[in-house]
């Protein structure tokens, strides 16, 4: 049961009935289907509601922060992980964890480690979300040991302990000798064996010997084929080797159990912290599913009010939002102590509104975003009680009306402030006059007890009472008489006609019969229908006028935005032209200086001093004209109001050229009165006295680094179980196919980084893997892993 249990079993049963009638489990089931893990799905399918307003607000804020991060490109590091609850319970009682259980715990700890990194990165900007993702960083030690000892198939690695490595090496030696001897025996007894092979029976190696010739092979018969034509014989020559193999295998099992015991002890020492890490992983998966639901349904986190009220704009039924069709959005206003009476045609959306409000009340307490406008407010409701559908019970001798009245009595007993009551066709199924006044009395009693009530009805008397004021208020779903169909638009403050005859005609009732029924209507009913139709038409015209005005406002805003964008585009183009011209001039200056340097070099070779000095004077005159700050260089007026700033000439500092006002970045410390600068995509050398300081408040941006100097931005390489392919023991010929399948999976899951574990060995497998990845069109970059990533035994690559 998703709502909290109380000491009122009958009341709890009413709440459970309401959950089924309003399809709360269906909504939770859909959200649970978006989770990545089984624990996350189970958490959502049985989602507990918040017990306080503050808890509900924290839940909503958590999802709000996650949606904000996702909108800015930061996503939770979510992946599948197993349920380790039973494994932790067994270890707590003293049991030794199996390889699969310990590997499952490692996967949980790996998820927790990724979530800790995410939490640390965003704890300042999104503290409420970050707080629920925290776990103990000391868990990295048992995680490292688990990953060191366990393979991806949950088997214990040879590297887990030297004793285990020796035991397995001895097993391999005995197996090799045993298989060599068996191959010899197969060839020796080729005339009596059923095939050119040996096999295993009951853990022993045997030969398949024809039953009519088994006496030719001395040994123990360990079984026969189904037909009896073949006997499986363990030759005497290999019995001793078989016994030795069993002994060695027992040693391997003992050493494996010792490793599992060591790992279990590591886990047992950190059981509370591991349970906390598991909770963080489940919470993250649940939040991710809720956020996915919000994105798919365009739902928004809303304000949860301590008051019992609804003030919802543009509300849409959450389950209808999961379909492909457009859902009509409606405004709904309701407070405790009020009863909203919804009337209108059948199939017009009255019951949908009831269910929508009930789901909204639970979603607000569960921290699930609401498909409504952001400024909507949903209050706190301790209980949601509903009577929707046919409650006929033949076993209890109750008619539909009797069952309905009994349920209304139970609801009335539990009506109080902060209770939401939803009644579909209240007091229907009996005499209309008596049913209408009974319904009115029930609604008044519910409202007097402080409950917030929403009912649907076709009773005209009930609509009239709601028009006269008091705790009852009218609302209606519309009907388009031109198109002869419901509009599904909820109108507050207006009663609606049932339009039974129009609906009957729409759904196939013969026209002549409908016309005859209309002739039988009392004059008062005809007048009332006409008045309702005229009122609906006036409302439609007003709505059209409002839409036209809104459309004009939107078009005016769009036109203003287009004009503003055009101005911004012109400004960008002007700045770009200025930048290009500045860079062109600076390039010209640079070329001229290079030419002058060449001339100076030539002058050094002139032997006549007088001639040399004369030419130098001419060269310097030309150089002074084209130098930065010279008469040929364009000048940008310095802002009169800009305060002078100290000149800092350290790498990375920003300076301004006196000549043209361009902002540059210092590349190197000054030397001999000159400094190397980056202006746009050009590097140049300038004198220190030709530079000005740039104040910290100056928003002028230095030119960007040139493309040929840019380093590709690659995602951070973090090795996990999910992004690592283990090729140890795989032949070079088979490695390429395994790598391609691994690469396909990473691309399908959107993983940016992958690791391939090939070990050291002869280096042939390592070279083949790196050459194959380097030639792939789907790989951006390949390199050997560094020491912190596992060393040269791994190759790390980035997908495109």
Image: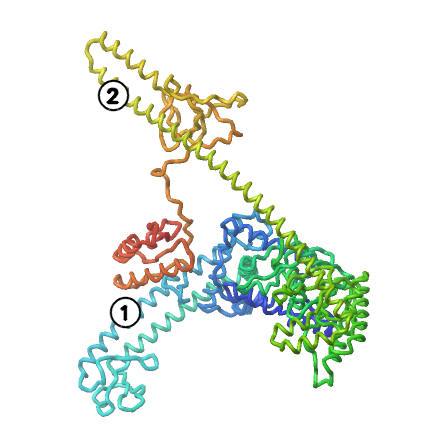
Q: Quadrant of the N terminus?
A: bottom right
Nearer-the-camera pick, 529 or 766:
529
Q: CA distance from mark 2 to mark 1?
A: 77 Å
Q: Could you tell me residue 354's position as x and y percent? A: 68, 66
Q: Where residue 173 is drawn, which disc sits there?
A: 1
Q: Give the residue number, with chain letter if any, for mark 2.
A: 598
Residue at 18%, 80% (x, y): give it.
Answer: 187
Residue 296, above or below 386 = above
Question: Is 79 on the left or on the right of 432, as rendered?
Answer: left
Residue 214: tell me if it is visible: yes
N-term-proximal mark, 2 vs 1: 1
- Residue at 65% over, 65% down: 479
Q: In this orientation, which residue lies closer to the viewer: 721 or 45?
A: 45
Determine the secondary structure under disc 1: helix
Q: Position of residue 570 (x, y in %)?
A: 46, 35
x%, y% of residue 515? 67, 75
Residue drawn at (23%, 15%), measured in percent from left and top?
Answer: 603
Residues at discs 2 and 1 in contact (Cβ within 8 Å): no
Quarter of the image where one finds residue 254? bottom left
């Amino acid at each position: 049961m998703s709502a909290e249990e109380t000491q009122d079993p009958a009341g709890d049963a009413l709440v459970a009935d309401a959950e089924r009638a309003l399809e709360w489990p269906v909504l939770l089931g859909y959200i649970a289907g978006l989770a990545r893990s089984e624990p996350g799905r189970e958490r959502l399918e049985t989602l507990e509601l918040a017990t306080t307003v503050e808890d509900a607000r924290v839940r909503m804020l958590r999802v709000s922060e996650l949606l904000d991060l996702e909108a800015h490109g930061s996503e939770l590091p979510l992946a599948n992980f197993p349920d380790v609850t039973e494994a932790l319970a067994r270890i707590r009682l003293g049991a030794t964890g199996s390889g699969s259980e310990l590997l499952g715990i490692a996967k949980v700890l790996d998820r927790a480690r990724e979530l800790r990194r995410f939490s640390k990165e965003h704890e300042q900007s999104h503290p409420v979300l970050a707080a629920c993702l925290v776990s103990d960083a000391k868990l990295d030690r048992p995680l490292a040991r688990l990953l060191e000892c366990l393979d991806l198939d949950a088997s214990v690695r040879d590297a887990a302990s030297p004793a285990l490595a020796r035991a397995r090496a001895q097993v391999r030696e005995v197996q090799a000798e045993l298989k060599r001897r068996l191959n010899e025996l197969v060839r020796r007894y080729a005339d009596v064996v059923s095939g050119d092979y040996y096999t295993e029976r009951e853990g022993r190696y045997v030969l398949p010997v024809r039953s009519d010739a088994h006496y030719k092979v001395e040994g123990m018969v360990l079984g026969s084929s189904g037909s009896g034509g073949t006997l499986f014989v363990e030759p005497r020559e290999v019995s001793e080797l078989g016994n030795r193999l069993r002994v060695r295998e027992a040693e391997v099992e003992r050493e494996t159990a010792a490793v599992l015991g060591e790992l279990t002890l590591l886990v047992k020492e950190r059981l509370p912290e591991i349970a906390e890490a598991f909770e963080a992983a489940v919470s993250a998966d649940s939040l991710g599913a809720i956020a996915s639901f919000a994105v798919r349904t365009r739902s928004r986190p809303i304000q949860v009010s301590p008051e019992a009220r609804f003030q919802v704009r543009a509300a849409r039924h959450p389950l209808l939002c999961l379909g492909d069709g457009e859902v009509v959005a409606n405004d709904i206003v309701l407070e405790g102590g009020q009863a909203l009476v919804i009337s209108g045609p059948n199939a017009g959306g009255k019951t949908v509104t009831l269910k929508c409000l009930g789901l909204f009340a639970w979603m607000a307490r569960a921290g699930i975003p609401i498909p409504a406008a952001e400024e909507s407010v949903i209050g706190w409701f301790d209980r949601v009680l509903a009577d929707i559908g046919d409650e006929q019970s033949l076993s209890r001798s109750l008619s539909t009306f009797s069952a309905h009245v009994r349920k209304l009595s139970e609801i009335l007993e539990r009506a109080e402030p902060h209770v939401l009551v939803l009644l579909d066709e209240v007091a229907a199924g009996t005499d209309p006059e008596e049913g209408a006044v009974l319904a009115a009395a029930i609604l008044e009693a519910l409202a007097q007890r402080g409950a917030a009530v929403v009912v649907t009805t076709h009773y005209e008397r009930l609509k009239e009472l709601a028009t006269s004021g008091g705790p009852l208020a009218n609302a209606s779903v519309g009907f388009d008489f031109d198109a002869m169909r419901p509009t599904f638009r909820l109108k507050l403050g207006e009663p609606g006609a049932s339009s039974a005859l129009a609906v009957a005609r729409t759904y196939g009732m013969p026209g002549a019969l409908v016309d005859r029924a209309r002739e039988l209507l009392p004059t008062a009913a005809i007048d009332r229908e006409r008045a309702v139709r005229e009122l609906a038409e006036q409302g439609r015209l007003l709505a059209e006028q409002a839409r036209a005005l809104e459309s004009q406002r939107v078009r005016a805003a769009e036109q203003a935005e287009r004009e503003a964008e055009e101005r911004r585009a012109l400004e960008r183009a002007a700045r770009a032209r200025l930048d290009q011209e500045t860079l062109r001039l600076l390039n010209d200056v640079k070329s001229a200086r290079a030419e002058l340097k060449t001339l100076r070099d030539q002058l050094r070779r002139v032997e006549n001093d007088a001639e040399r000095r004369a030419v130098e004077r001419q060269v310097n005159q030309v150089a002074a004209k084209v130098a930065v700050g010279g008469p040929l260089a364009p000048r940008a007026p310095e802002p009169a109001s800009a305060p002078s700033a100290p000149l800092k000439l350290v790498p990375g500092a920003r300076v301004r050229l006196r000549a043209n006002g361009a902002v540059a970045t210092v590349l190197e410390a000054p030397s001999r009165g000159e400094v190397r600068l980056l202006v746009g995509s050009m590097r140049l050398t300038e004198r220190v006295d030709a530079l000005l300081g740039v104040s910290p408040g100056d928003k002028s941006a230095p030119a960007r680094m040139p493309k040929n100097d840019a380093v590709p931005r690659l995602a951070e390489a973090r090795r996990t179980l999910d992004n690592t392919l283990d090729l140890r023991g795989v032949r070079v010929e088979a490695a390429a196919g395994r790598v391609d399948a691994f690469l396909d999976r990473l691309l399908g899951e959107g993983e940016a980084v992958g690791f391939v574990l090939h070990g050291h060995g002869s280096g042939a497998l390592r070279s083949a893997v790196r050459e194959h990845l380097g030639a792939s069109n789907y790989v951006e970059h390949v390199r050997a892993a560094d020491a912190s990533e596992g060393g040269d035994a791994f190759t790390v690559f980035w997908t495109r």
